[in-house]
């Protein structure tokens, strides 16, 4: 990571934490979950039986590897496979393996906000799929989108897995998709995972597991603020709480103060008060239907070419064109 990017992330972190803790109701952005401990906790989440998203997307990629790869295939000069929010790349590896074994001509460009994730992904790929050319980048989605415009000499396949778009409320999702569309040319495509609406219990369980992994993941943002901004959150006095509204399809995570507290954030010269049961909203995980994805695509100037789903119909990966 360049020093410039690092500084930019640092200042936006400070700015956003200040903003989020001084407005009412309080919030902290889920994009700051992913430090070293957060990356590890998210990997633990993906391995939990309750967190069906990972298994479903795995199943989709495994069952439909060939047709998906055929959508990716470029002309003579191949394609750039650009993955936003690559994380540990476990699921993408299914596709990479197939593409590599079948001599597709492509470069894999994983992009992630987490330096840790990118480092370990690059190392693993070098070991497991040495024939795949990997060209990683660190950055936030919107900032990376600008740079995507440079990849225009051949077909671009943009991949966003894990229902990562679910962290964005619809207006921001449309903004994101529109900006993706703006970087796309005629033959380019977008391959994106959207978690679907389903039985509310199933969704709630995925975000409030009994073992407390999701709770630890959510609270880790306070641990991070403590460490990086010299704050004194009493992390154990906050309770992880999840809600799911089956009408809007929005799952929301909160940290709830279980008592009156005063917290000092030294790096921000800030002291804040929590009333008993006051909340910090940390994350949304939006659930979708075909209708909603159709509407998002329409609003963004994209067209759905096809979609793939798992045997339970819990999750869908859509192929978009502009
Ligand atoms: C990585 C944003 C897709 O919202 O399902 C998992 C993150 N949060 N458990 C999601 C998450 C709590 C995840 N995304």
Image: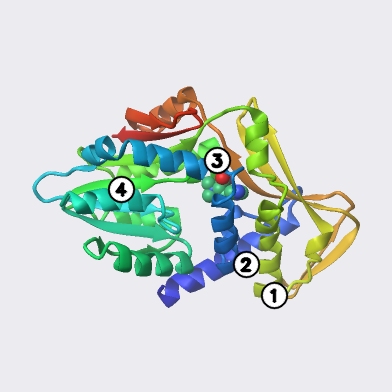
Residue to which mark 4 is pinned? 95
How far apart are the two marked residues, 3 and 2, measured between alpha carbons?
A: 34 Å
Mark 1 vs 2: CB contact within 8 A: yes
Place of residue 144 in the rendered image (x, y in percent of width and height, measured from the top left): 38, 57
Mark 1 or mark 2, earlier in chain: 2
Residue to which mark 3 is pinned? 52
Image quadrant in which the N terminus is located: bottom left
Eye-nearest disc, 1 or 3: 3
Residue 14: give its label: 2
Residue at the image point whose x is 68% and y is 32% from the top: 201
Regarding mark 2 in the picture, which secondary structure is present there?
helix
Mark 1 or mark 4, earlier in chain: 4
Q: Tell me if mark 3 has few (under 14), some (14-19) or many (20+) residues whose alpha carbon lies within 10 angstroms of its own.
A: many
The correct choice, above or below, for 140 with respect to 76 in the image is below
How far apart are the two marked residues, 1 and 3, measured between alpha carbons?
A: 39 Å
Residue at the image point whose x is 83% and y is 50% from the top: 278
Mark 3 or mark 2, earlier in chain: 2
Query: Image quarter for residue 308?
Result: top left
């Amino acid at each position: 990571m360049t020093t410039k990017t690092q500084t930019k992330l640092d200042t936006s972190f400070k700015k956003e934490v200040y903003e989020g803790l001084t407005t009412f109701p309080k919030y902290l952005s889920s994009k700051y979950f992913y430090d070293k401990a957060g990356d590890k906790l998210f990997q633990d989440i993906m391995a939990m039986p309750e967190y069906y998203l990972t298994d479903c997307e795995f199943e989709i990629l495994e069952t439909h590897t060939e047709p998906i790869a055929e959508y990716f295939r470029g002309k003579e000069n191949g394609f750039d496979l650009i993955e936003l929010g690559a994380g540990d790349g476990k699921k993408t590896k299914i596709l990479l393996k197939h593409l590599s074994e079948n001599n597709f001509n492509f470069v894999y460009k994983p992009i992630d906000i987490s330096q840790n994730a990118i480092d370990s992904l690059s190392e693993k790929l070098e070991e497991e799929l040495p024939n795949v050319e990997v060209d990683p980048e660190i950055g936030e989605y919107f900032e990376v989108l600008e740079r995507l415009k440079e990849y225009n000499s051949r077909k671009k396949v943009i991949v966003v897995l894990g229902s990562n778009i679910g962290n964005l409320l619809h207006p921001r999702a449309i903004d994101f998709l529109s900006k993706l569309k703006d970087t796309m040319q005629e033959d380019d495509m977008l391959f994106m995972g959207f978690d679907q609406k389903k039985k509310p219990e199933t969704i709630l369980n995925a975000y409030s597991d009994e073992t407390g992994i999701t709770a630890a993941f959510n609270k880790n943002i306070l641990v991070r603020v403590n460490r990086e901004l010299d704050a004194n959150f009493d992390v154990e006095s906050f309770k992880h709480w999840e809600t799911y509204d089956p009408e809007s399809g929005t799952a929301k995570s909160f940290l709830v103060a279980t008592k009156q507290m005063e917290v000092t954030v030294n790096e921000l010269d800030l002291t804040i008060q929590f009333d008993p049961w006051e909340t910090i909203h940390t994350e949304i995980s939006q659930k979708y239907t075909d209708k909603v994805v159709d509407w998002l695509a329409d609003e963004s100037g994209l067209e759905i070419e096809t979609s793939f789903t798992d045997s339970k119909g819990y999750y869908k990966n859509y192929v978009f064109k502009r």
